[in-house]
Amino acid sequence: MINDEQVEVLLLDMLEKYGYDFTGYSKASLKRRIHRLYSLDKSLSFAEFRFRISDDPAYFKRFVEQITVNVTEMFRDPAFFKTLRNDVLPKLGTYPLIRIWLAGCSTGEEAYSISIILKELNLLHKALIYATDINPAVLEKASQGMFGLSQMKQYSENYILAGGTRDFSSYYTAKYSLAKLVPELKSKIIFSSHNLVSDHSFNEFQLILCRNVLIYFDRDLQHKVIDLFDNSLEELGYLALGTKETLEFSPLAKKYKRIQNEKIWRKVS
Amino acid sequence: MACEALIIGGSAGSLDVLLKVLPDLNGDLSFPIIIVVHRKRGTDSLLPDLLSGKTRLRVKEADEKETIKAGFIYIAPSDYHLLIENDRSFSLDFSEKINYSRPSIDATFEAAAEVYKDKLVCMLLSGSNSDGVNGLKVVKAFGGIAVIQDPKSAQVSYMPAQAAENVKIDYTLGIKDAAKFINLLSS
């Protein structure tokens, strides 16, 4: 087992060698991920593992890819996407340009889900979705817009539960074991790397989504990231978090009004 | 030993056991109980409500960053792994399923083993897969106590039977003895 001290050693190495700061991540999950990779790659010893990470940039890339959690789905939590469809996005429809930031987009499933809803609301032509992640490898996969064909049944069910009424299969073409999403869905998405820990605000948005990212951050880092979102959100804009995440711990919460039963807050002052 | 936390894991057939055991627990236990049971996603809020009607202890779903307190029963939320930090708070994790399960009993047992060490008691109930077995091994390696429901009394014996086969179990309990055992852990 990788112990707490060894985790600290690796985090300091990463910060010094590569400028990646993971010291504000929740330790239990991080330790689990590191231990998983350590076993998966059959490392001979901690020293060897440590040396490989700091000496081999390609392995470091794998390390970052593996210790961050990249599990996602299209229309995950259908009720959430239903609220986006029925309440949030129609309100944003009055803007000449709808700017959306999806922070921690992973392999892109949520970005494409939002694209589908925008298209069905006839808003896609005037929307821009900035989909960002710390991890270059997942962004590359995201921009391909190809997902496992076997997942489409689940995604189609989610889509219907989220208020979708069209034939979900019209959004992709099957290619061997893959489903390739129609190019139109990608036309308004910009995939780009952004590190919530160290990078600054880069625009103003009417909707920021960051779901199941804050659970991996300690409280200090959560405060910092909420500040970043607040600085990047226009007045009357919306902030959406994951099902088990909240804004309530932040002093900024008083500037926001929560949409009932959903983890979506509107910036009201 | 002074028990600092009790974690109960279960799958198919474990809810019945909980419904029988919880009413007999003392209302002033000196440690928290953390329950990780497999269930369908989206059935979230039902379980805490169901269980809170059956016990004098306070029942709630575990929140991320929440400080873990004695006298509470915490339920792992559906579709997240429930982990425990050194400062005795919860964190949530949405990584890959483990043993086809999220929450995974192994994930919680293993994280807790390192934090509570020899002051941890983990109990594995009825179930149809082997989630939790590896976790019990880790609990034992850190000096904690491994308990299983007697496979003979389990609706689905596979899970506790696998544990009995692979881990040096400290106590094997029938349903009737479980509440008494838990009450005696309290100091």
Image (tube, grey):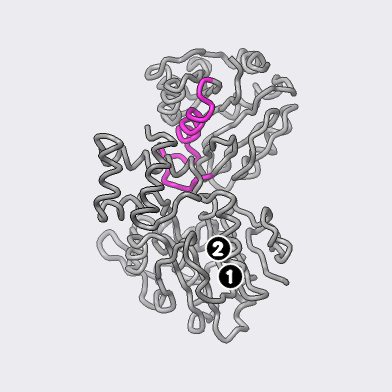
Q: Residue at x 63, y 18 (%)?
A: B182
Which image quarter holds the N terminus of chain B?
top right
Q: Secondary structure at mark 1?
A: helix
| Amino acid type, mark 1 | Arg
Bounds of the magenta segment = B92-118
| Amino acid type, mark 2 | Ala
Crowd rating for badge 1 (residues with CA inside 10 Å; few <14, some 14–19, many 20+): many
Which image quarter holds the C terminus of chain B?
top right
Label 2: which residue?
A: A162
Image quarter of residue B140: top left
From the top left corner, tell me how far across and down residue A206 is, in percent: 59, 75
From the top left corner, tell me how far across and down residue A203 is, in percent: 52, 76
Image quarter of residue A81: bottom right
The tag on residue A85 is 1
From the top left corner, tell me how far across and down residue B10 is, in percent: 52, 29
Nearer to me, B67 or B134:
B67
Vertical comparison of B113 with A140: above or below:
above
Q: Label 2, label 1: how many angstroms apart (C-alpha)?
A: 8 Å
Is residue B165 located in the magenta-colored stretch of the structure?
Answer: no
Of callouts 2 and 1, which one flags the residue occurring earlier in the amino acid sequence?
1
Q: Which chain does the numbered disc 1 sit on?
A: A
Q: Which chain does the numbered disc 2 sit on?
A: A
Nearer to me, B153 or A64:
A64
Image quarter of residue B2: top right
Nearer to me, A229 or B133:
A229
